[in-house]
Image: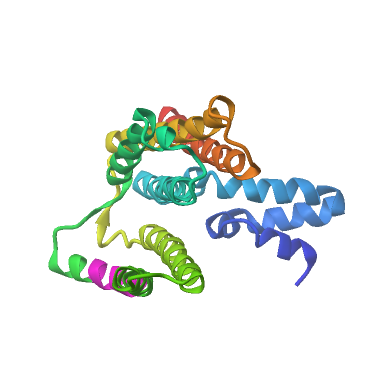
Amino acid sequence: MSWAARLVRLYPASLRSRWGAGLEDEARAAGWRRLPNLVVGALDMWVHPVVWPADSAAQRRSRASALVFAAGLSGWLLGHVAVEDSLLPENVVHSWAANISDVLVLAGLVLVVPLPRLSVRAMLRLVAQALRRLAVPVVIGGAVYVAANLSASLSPGLRITLLVGWWLALVLGSVQVCTVVAGLDPEDVVAPEPGRLWWGIGMVAAALAVGGGVVLWSTVVDGVTGLLPLVLGGALLVLTALCGWTLRDLYTLAAG
């Protein structure tokens, strides 16, 4: 396989199936001078799934739903890092802004997720997929919870083991939930309607913006030091931008 063909494989499958041959020919003609542009173009496409070639508007909305769900769940996980590791003071963790962020991200995730079709076959397939994907993180999380509550006193070694197991369950569970949402079969679910999707993306974006602002503001006002809070706050704002780009893509396609 040539270097141009390998480079084109960085692009999403739907783009490769339609424009892959043209991209490969363009890369060969331009040589290594086009390498940075093609790599940047591939990365750009992965954060704009709404503009990929699609068979219907519902397919585009499903892609937007999966992307925003992953962004919102990732933001929730990052916020959990700040709380669990005591990176932020108590007055920040329990502030009204942090509480609003939690409510908004939960409401937004509920709104953007596709709804199951009202058929026994669809319900059974969805339940089977969820059980297959989430069995391992649920078992790990349950074992950690039971061990933590049964032990009268935790040794340092056991405490570290349980902490690693807890975070492993959270990360693995988040990845698997995103995988389930991204892989939902159109025969089993209905893509969110435009209005519900737009409201959901807006809520997730607002929640991430508020969360990132709270974390970064605490480094200025409350004297929180260290690199990790800055990284967490910046990551939340990047996820906010991702949701904003998705809203813009949906609006541009609807207007066009």
| Quadrant (top left, top right, bottom left, bottom right) of the N terminus | bottom right
What colouring does the structure picture have? Answer: rainbow
In this view of the protein, which residue sits in the foreground, 168 or 72? Answer: 168
| Quadrant (top left, top right, bottom left, bottom right) of the C terminus | top left
Q: Give the answer, above or below, for where 150 lies relative to 107.
A: below
Is any atom of residue 159 visible in this view? Answer: yes
Report if residue 131 lies within the magenta region.
Answer: yes
Q: Residue furthest front?
A: 153
Q: Residue at x 84, y 50 (%)?
A: 30
Q: Main secondary structure of the magenta part?
A: helix
Report if residue 7 lies within the magenta region.
Answer: no
Is any atom of residue 205 visible in this view? Answer: no
Lateral position of residue 216 relative to residue 175, left or right: right
- Residue 31 horizontal/vertical position (percent): 86, 54
Q: Residue at x 46, y 66 (%)?
A: 168
Q: Residue at x 37, y 75 (%)?
A: 136
Q: Give the answer, above or below, for where 208 lies relative to 151.
A: above
Q: Quadrant of residue 204?
A: top left
In this view of the protein, which residue sits in the foreground, 36 or 145? Answer: 145
- Residue 172 horizontal/vertical position (percent): 44, 65
Q: Give the answer, above or below, for where 221 lies relative to 138.
A: above
Which residues are the magenta region?
125-135
Lateral position of residue 97 relative to residue 52, left or right: left
